[in-house]
Amino acid sequence: MADRYLSFTATAPGRFLTRRLGLPQPAVLRRWSPAQSSLPGGLLHLTAGTSRLDLAAVLARTGPEAAASDPAAVVLDATGVRDVDTLAEVHALLHPVVRSVAESGRVVLLGAPLDPDDHHQAAVQQALEGFTRSLGKEIGRGRTVNLVRLTDAAAAESTLRFLLSPKSAYVSGQVIGVGAGPAGDRADPDRPLAGRTALVTGGARGIGEAVARTLARDGARVVVLDVPQAEADARGVAERLGGGALALSLDITAADAGERIAAELPDGLDVLVHNAGITRDRRLVNMPAERWSAVLDVNLASVLRTTDALLAKGALRPGGRIVATASIAGLAGNAGQTNYGASKAGVAGLVRALAPRALAEHGVTVNAVAPGFIETRMTAAVPLFIREAGRRMNSLAQGGLPVDVAETTAWLARPDSGAVNGQVVRVCGQSLLGA
Ligand code: NAD
């Protein structure tokens, strides 16, 4: 379902009229394409307090060229902020430059992990979150603001590469934790997933199809798994992807789904994307047990079952990546979705608990994407007024596209994203829900 309001405000008369009426002014986001693979300008690197990060070399490899003025990206290293005085440097450094950041530009703050033995440091490092989320809400013009907590710049290279590119167009107001590393194998910038096999559940359409397409663009051989009823669509997707892609007809709720996947891929796999999901909305008072169990089974139980089976069989190769799909409905709650909200919050719980163990025992990272309002068949079925509210109630004043979730998944799937583990990253344009 096209966002006609966004198309209207992109015209001169539409912009004039909606401005006069005080209506939202969504910017047309600059998303990645082969012809538009970088941000529209240079990078300004600022430092508040005394930093111990070795950042310059990483930024030189990752980001846009350095720019002294009118940047498209600002990286503010605030890892050295330890007290209220050094926190004031964040204001002093950004206050004069924010206005000049290009449309669809990026502000990325870097913070340190909170020090439990130093409540002054913990207070001002936590303050960076409130700062980031507030600036995200006011900056406008398609610009995003995110905070990365890190201790080692090299371990965060793939994350900075993602945030400082058009691929993160719909990710704003997020706090992403990056561990000390190791980051994993160095990746070919153009085809980071070359030589890797990726399986996407629910890959026949919607977000799953976009994930399959994006992972194939990045060089992966993709297995498109979907229910037998969607076999023709799954085959069509696999044929269009090429690169040895294949379709796998399987209901992911089957008790032996993990074993069947392992049997289908005897050489194992590197990337497992749990994307299949369903909704069966009703308020709890009207919800029969079948609606509850159908949603919990597809969205959570099958994710737990197949993950356990594939890890136990060693089917995920070392350096493997699991990316599950949560939802902001699971983080914020949504009337009529006790089943769906429970299932998606469960995914976040699974990710946080399993991540350290899966990395230690199998060399596999486990993360989740949590989409907000994304333009798909699922959201096209939402009644008009609720749909319109869902689209506008975020800092970018528009819905995301399946490719926004796919790009986030592709970043988490990269071989050099090994220091990103146990994260639940919202792809929601900084939705007001559960922010
Ligand atoms: P969609 O309904 O368009 O596609 C879901 C796909 O999963 C379909 O191809 C379907 O056949 C498949 N599927 C369903 N049950 C399955 C099963 N038992 N086994 C195998 N495949 C199965 O949905 P979408 O909008 O693309 O959503 C994809 C994921 O993103 C879901 O997990 C959804 O909950 C989540 N999500 C979507 C949004 C949104 O705004 N669209 C928001 C938050 C989260």
Image (spheres, rainbow, N blue to C red):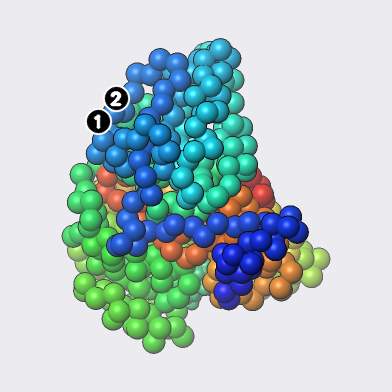
Q: Residue at x 55, y 57 (%)?
A: 27
User: Callout 1: helix, strand or loop?
Assistant: helix
Image quadrant in which the C terminus is located: top right
132 vs 158: above or below: above
Image quadrant in which the N terminus is located: bottom right
Q: Nearer the viewer, residue 141 or 262?
A: 141
| Disc 2 packing (10 Å; few <14; some 14–19; many ≥20) | few
Q: Which mark is residue 267?
A: none
Task: Tell whether 173 sits left or right of 176.
Answer: right
Image coordinates of residue 110 in percent, x first then y, are 44, 30
Image coordinates of residue 401 in percent, x first then y, are 50, 64
User: Callout 2: helix, strand or loop?
Assistant: loop
Q: Which mark is residue 54?
A: 2
Task: Identify the residue under disc 1.
Answer: 57
Image coordinates of residue 18 in percent, x first then y, are 69, 61
142 vs 383: above or below: above
Task: Tell whether 59 sits left or right of 119.
Answer: left
Q: Residue at x 49, y 38 (%)?
A: 100
Q: Residue at x 44, y 29 (%)?
A: 76
Q: Is residue 313 visible?
A: no
Q: Is residue 404 visible?
A: yes
Task: Tell whether 420 sits left or right of 245.
Answer: right
Q: Residue at x 59, y 65 (%)?
A: 12
Quarter holding residue 182:
top left
Tell me the amino acid under the disc marked 1.
Answer: Ala
